[in-house]
């Protein structure tokens, strides 16, 4: 499997903003962190890709949630050591979420 292209990453982000989507709801967003191997990343990387769940969910703006979520997608596709595996697993997961598993802009 080849490393994803920048265009593939951008296409996934476009899919994820379709219909005013912001990010997955917390339960699914935690799964995103597992897929992108968050716990294996250096602390300086973790700061930019940590999902805003638990207390962060209530206090974070939709724009902040969207920014972090898009950073996670970019990380998975462009910078992850296992980009070939991680990005395509993430893409498959996100494109199979139901409408009820997304947080939307109202």
Image: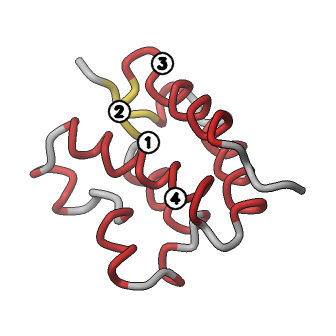
Residue at the image point whose x is 39% and y is 39% from the top: 23
> Spatial distance from mark 4 to mark 1, Cα to Cα?
17 Å
> Spatial distance from mark 3 to mark 1, Cα to Cα?
13 Å
Question: Residue most toward the right?
Answer: 1
Q: Are marks 2 and 3 in contact (CB under 8 Å)?
A: no
Which residue, given by chain and number where applicable, does mark 1 sit on? 24
Which residue, given by chain and number where applicable, does mark 2 sit on? 22
- How far across and down, in percent of the image, does residue 16 sit? 50, 30
Residue at the image point whose x is 41% and y is 52% from the top: 71
Between marks 3 and 1 in the image, the one whose residue lies nearer the viewer: 3
State the SS at label 2: strand
Q: Residues within 10 Å of mark 1 (few under 14, many from 20)?
A: many
Which residue, given by chain and number where applicable, does mark 4 sit on? 75
Which residue, given by chain and number where applicable, does mark 3 sit on? 18
Between marks 4 and 2 in the image, the one whose residue lies nearer the viewer: 4
Residue at the image point whose x is 51% and y is 33% from the top: 13
> Spatial distance from mark 3 to mark 4, Cα to Cα?
20 Å
Q: Nearer the viewer, residue 78 or 88?
A: 78
Q: Are marks 4 and 1 in contact (CB under 8 Å)?
A: no
């Amino acid at each position: 499997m080849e490393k994803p292209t920048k265009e593939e990453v951008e296409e996934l982000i476009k899919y994820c903003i379709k219909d005013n989507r912001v990010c997955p709801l917390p339960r699914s967003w935690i799964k995103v962190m597992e897929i992108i191997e968050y716990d294996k990343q250096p602390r300086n990387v973790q700061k930019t890709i940590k999902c805003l769940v638990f207390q962060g969910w209530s206090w974070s703006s939709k724009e902040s949630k969207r920014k972090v979520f898009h950073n996670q997608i970019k990380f998975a596709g462009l910078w992850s050591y296992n980009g070939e595996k991680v990005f395509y697993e993430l893409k498959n997961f996100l494109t199979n979420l139901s409408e009820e598993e997304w947080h939307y802009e109202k």
